[in-house]
Amino acid sequence: MEQALYKLPDGWKWKKLGDLFDIGSSKRVHQKDWTTEGVPFYRAREVVLLSKNGSVDNELFISESMYQSFAAKYGLPENGDILVTGVGTLGVCYVVKENDKFYYKDGNIICLKRKSEEINSRFVEYAFQSSVLKRQVNDSAGSVVATYTISRAKSTDIPFAPVEVQNRIVEKLDALLTRIDSAIEHLQESVALADALFESSQSEIFNDVLSNYQHSTIDEICIVTSSKRIFKADYVESGIPFYRTKEIVDLSKEKNISTELFIDKEKFSEICGKFGAPKKGDLLFSAVGTIGVMWIVDEREFYFKDGNLLWLKDMNGVTPEYLKSAISAVLTEKIKDRSQGAAYKAISITNLKAFEIPLPSIEEQKSIVAKIEHVSSVTKKTKQELSLQINDLHNLKASILDSAFKGEL
């Protein structure tokens, strides 16, 4: 995608990254060569963490002997080189420091080596955050999987200033963006605090309920089941939406979802006739991975993935709103404790059936839910206000970066 290049101030020029840098990648390291200790081996995800935090708890390594062999034959990343992610989150940069010692994955990461000392690597790192480079980096040119390749990097246009101007811009951006990032971090902490306060308030509301009412198992008050198996071969391009955990998580947050999978209407009708399908007022519960996220089913027509989601239906003496709140407030920690191993967290139908919740009258359930919904409403409003402030700061940051690379800072 060709983009119109805007007019630059006197002394600035449009340059191709390939004119400024030798651009390449590493030598292939096979998975069999990975070790549990030695020299850190970085993939794109580690570069993203390095860019964000300045450090990373690394999981993969190569041997010292392999590292020294690569150093002798091919060279290594050096002080001032720029690593750029070419897969996943594209165009994230890390400027190599003097004492860094690591190797990196070919293909996932490209390396920019300066051809001249008249290039401030930090200036280029900031340029990758500006809209003019982001548009070029994220233009996948019709590819199914987005990548930023060596050839695309060589042809990327960058507004390039004299080195003294580069240094001045880097100094100004360091000062301005550090303050903005700090403000964003504080607001994000406030969002987390709002969630914690809601959970604390919800627990307080349920304290009296726990001690003052008879408890019943979930098996005693509703049917806990799942769906019938849908195979990949059953997916079609359009038809009845087919939900996985990710869609239920988004629905629980009242987000609009973009349905990616469907099953045939005739297949759905056949399943409904034999086994039924979720209806308004039923509850879906995420049972694998992200555990305990719940969504009260509305009028929409859909089917869902077996195993990943549990289906609570035919409730007796309990409202879906109260059941959802009770599980969320009282049983979340027990759900985590009963998970099927630390590495693969899951809750089975049998596990969920055995959980106990306090069971007041329907009228008292409605009163309890009303209190929780009031706290939830206040929390949601607070988080929305904080999110608006965070978005404003991100927009300010983007505006400052764009101004910097138009020579207007």
Image (cartoon, helix red, strand yellow):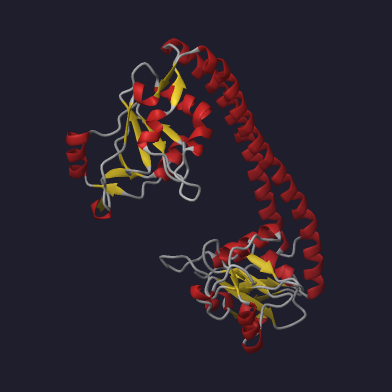
Lateral position of residue 179 relative to residue 41, left or right: right
Image coordinates of residue 305 in percent, x first then y, are 33, 44
Q: Nearer the viewer, residue 148 or 71?
A: 71
Identify the residue at image location x=53%, y=77%: 29
The one nearer the camera, 25 or 176, is 25
The total of numbered circles placed on residues is 0
Would residue 16 be seen by someone viewing this image from the given angle?
no
Q: Would residue 174 be found to the left or right of residue 399 on screen?
A: right
Image coordinates for residue 358, horizontal then vertical, percent: 47, 18
Q: Is residue 37 above or below residue 334?
A: below
The one nearer the camera, 324 or 223, is: 223
Q: Position of residue 280 (x, y in %)?
A: 33, 27
82 to 302, vertically: above or below:
below
Quadrant of the rendering where the C terminus is positioned = bottom right
Q: Is residue 62 above or below residue 379?
A: below
Q: Residue at x 19, y 44 (%)?
A: 267
Quarter of the rendering containing residue 11: bottom right
Instruction: Evaluate whether residue 391 shows in this view.
Output: yes
- Tell me if 369 is positioned left or right of 38 in this view: left
Near-viewer residue (237 or 318): 318
Which residue is at a point 58% across and 79% down the rendered structure image? 26
Residue shown at 36%/16% (left/top)? Answer: 317
Q: Whole-percent x and y of residue 242?
A: 32, 44
